[in-house]
Amino acid sequence: MATKRRFSPRKQPTQARARRTWNAVLDGAAQVLIAQGYERATTDRIAERTGVSVGTIYEYFPNKDAIFAALQRRWNEQRWALFEESRQIDLEDDLETVLRKTIHARIEATKLNPKLNSVLMRDVPASVTADQAAQLHDEFLAASVQIFGRFKGAIRSNDWQLMARLMIHATHAVIDNIAASEPDLLDAPELENELVLMMQRYVEN
Amino acid sequence: MATKRRFSPRKQPTQARARRTWNAVLDGAAQVLIAQGYERATTDRIAERTGVSVGTIYEYFPNKDAIFAALQRRWNEQRWALFEESRQIDLEDDLETVLRKTIHARIEATKLNPKLNSVLMRDVPASVTADQAAQLHDEFLAASVQIFGRFKGAIRSNDWQLMARLMIHATHAVIDNIAASEPDLLDAPELENELVLMMQRYVEN
Amino acid sequence: MATKRRFSPRKQPTQARARRTWNAVLDGAAQVLIAQGYERATTDRIAERTGVSVGTIYEYFPNKDAIFAALQRRWNEQRWALFEESRQIDLEDDLETVLRKTIHARIEATKLNPKLNSVLMRDVPASVTADQAAQLHDEFLAASVQIFGRFKGAIRSNDWQLMARLMIHATHAVIDNIAASEPDLLDAPELENELVLMMQRYVEN
Amino acid sequence: MATKRRFSPRKQPTQARARRTWNAVLDGAAQVLIAQGYERATTDRIAERTGVSVGTIYEYFPNKDAIFAALQRRWNEQRWALFEESRQIDLEDDLETVLRKTIHARIEATKLNPKLNSVLMRDVPASVTADQAAQLHDEFLAASVQIFGRFKGAIRSNDWQLMARLMIHATHAVIDNIAASEPDLLDAPELENELVLMMQRYVEN
DNA sequence: GATGAATGAGACTTCATTCAT
DNA sequence: TATGAATGAAGTCTCATTCAT
């Protein structure tokens, strides 16, 4: 896919130093992005913030947007890792508990860096992040479908795909928009409760 | 607010010809935006598509982003107008009917121009459209709260603000994301049914 | 042809002012080229020397090398115009006179700007000037073949194409190299005499 | 002369391994030059093609253009060596034979690597190769003058210097341009015959 | 000797904005 | 009022060169 190649990293950093530089560039990019927004996040500014020269950035990334694509990917991986680690679903959990753990884990994942979450979602052009976003979306979709599979008898509809899409879009939108406009609310139990209730009522028979 | 001043139109076009030019510029901007994306939507290209000179654009807009802010505002007004016209809530309507009419009207409004909707949402920087988006959000919020007020007894929670926010974010996200990724699905009754069901179950006692 | 499009001018300057700017840019480019060579002939330097801004250059030329392609073209046209005007071949002229007038005219054309001639030939990459050079070469080739046609009986070989190629390459090389290394020699009658003699003996029976 | 110092090799590679590396770099440079042209012949690409690191290149050459200067010099030496070896002038040879052997040897020398010949002549800036080119030119000049000396009585003019310059420029130009535009023609006897004829008639009484 | 990651000056080019006509 | 040529700041990216390992 053209987009994939266009934004794919130039060299895989295998050595420790290289990996450190790579991550430092993404850290710098995230900071500049948060502080100044996408339009002002120039390669020069990212280099300066990172403490490397522009040339070094181009050792690792073929062009500017590849940095943001990589940053989005790393952010997705970080969120997904925390999500998985934080869910901890047991075999005895009932549907409500599973939904609660899932939604809780999503909120926790977002709280890793709400500002980065917002700016990646709202300021970086979709063309840059679309591929990564679609992939994460699919992973969440699969997780949702898995839940339906486990609680087959209790699930209302059998168009799991459509139900999962609504769940994912709705849950993500609520969490991401709250993260952007009122991040403190992410800590409030009401938000979680309401989301759990919305989803439980939505999927249950 | 600085932002407001920065993006506010340079002159109120009262005369008919002026208003026609103004709208033509927004039409041109919308076309370029859809065809080329925000990054390639330059003033020159907009001027060319519109059939006027760059100079003329600057007669009506103080800077480039003011065009997109105005376009977002016009798009919001168009959607809202169709939304209101299409809802037609009667006094005898029960809660489900009201929700259905509301959601149906939102979908119809989006269908006015799904591509414009997508590109404004996903490609134009949040800083440009944030003000307009917040305002529309508030209008929808008020509409939701009004519904709760009318069906007081049947409503589960009394934190109407929070409930309304979840409703708005969830509904918008579902419709907008579907509009972006699979616009034909906007015509499917399932989508509407599922959304109505999600919201009805969410708000009812 | 890709090359043609790559170096073809961006807009045909039809208005007087535009044509003046266009020529000014080529003048500036020629001066920088002569003074600093191709490698140091940057768009910034050309703009500064021309007295316009870089942006103006890019109104007329799609990229840097298009400037040099256009300069080569203009130089070819200037030389060809003077060449034609200066040859003035009469119907009574014998072969030697025709050759002398031709060679004389070529030398005169080169003397219009020997330094520009040298730098375009030796410093600007062939990829930039090849198209123009080939075209001029063909015009001279045709002129030579025409001479052979007029003096059919006196001409040694009947492979006019090959003969013409040798004539053109040899004559051009001598004149251009002398122009580059010892321009004053262009004014010496010996050079012309020797060239005429070389060509006359070469083509005659 | 500044130029001479600028492009002179950093260290005289006396040891066998060092000389091997040196030649490998020139080979790599020649390949990149032929495949990509001067503008894209970067030190990184040359290093990669050669199979060494950039650092190693800078052990042997003070800067990039010194590589091409050295390559031009080596190419000149190779051509000259073959030229001398191939000419094999006997004491009994008459003028025509000497000219024929000379021209034949020049053509053969060019055929060693017509593409390298073209790219060095047409793509590498004159400033880089001028010194080497001038030196080779002088050697050929001396060879021509020597011929005139041997056949004193048969030679038309006594301005041997001028005659030799015309011969050299004309012969070189014909061969080099044919090598660039139609290398197969170098094998055709007509080309050689015509060149011999042109030169013989030019210098003879 | 060799390596190649890092540097950073500087090249090309775009495009929002102005202003003389 | 409209035009569009001109501006020039600012952005992206390359690549010759260095130097710590």
Image (spheres, coloured by chain):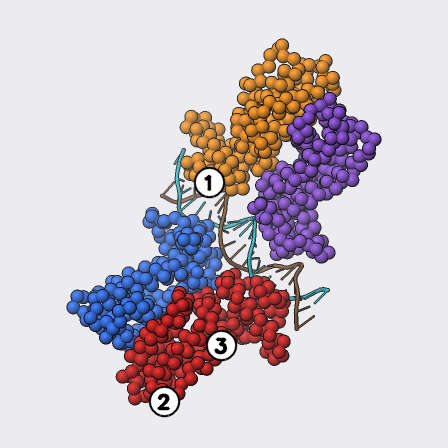
Chain colours: A purple, B orange, C blue, D red, E brown, F cyan
Q: Chain of mark 2?
A: D
> Mark 2 highlights which residue?
D92
Give a yes or no on whether discs 3 and 2 share a subunit. yes
Left or right: where does residue A7 sit relative to residue B205?
A: left
Q: Secondary structure at mark 2?
A: loop
| Quadrant in the picture for the C terminus of chain B | top right
Give a yes or no on whether discs 2 and 1 share a subunit. no
Q: Earlier in the sequence, mark 3 or mark 2?
A: 3
What crowding class fits label 2: few (fewer than 14 Cα within 10 Å), some (14-19), or many (20 or more)?
few
Q: Amino acid at mark 1?
A: Arg
Residue B55 seen from this side: no
Q: Amino acid at mark 3?
A: Gln
| Quadrant in the picture for the N terminus of chain B | top right
- Residue E13 picture location, percent across and down: 49, 51
> Mark 3 highlights which residue?
D78
Residues at marks 3 and 2, CA–CA distance in whole angstroms = 27 Å
Nearest to the eye among marks 2 and 1: give it.
2
Left or right: where does residue D57 sit relative to residue C182?
A: right
Q: Amino acid at mark 2?
A: Glu
Nearest to the eye among marks 3 and 1: give it.
3
Residue D167 or A180: which is nearer the viewer? D167
Q: Is residue B39 shown above or below D153? A: above
Residue at left 58%, top 32%?
A: B182
Residue E21 or B65: which is nearer the viewer? B65
Task: Say which mark, if any, is on residue B45.
Answer: 1
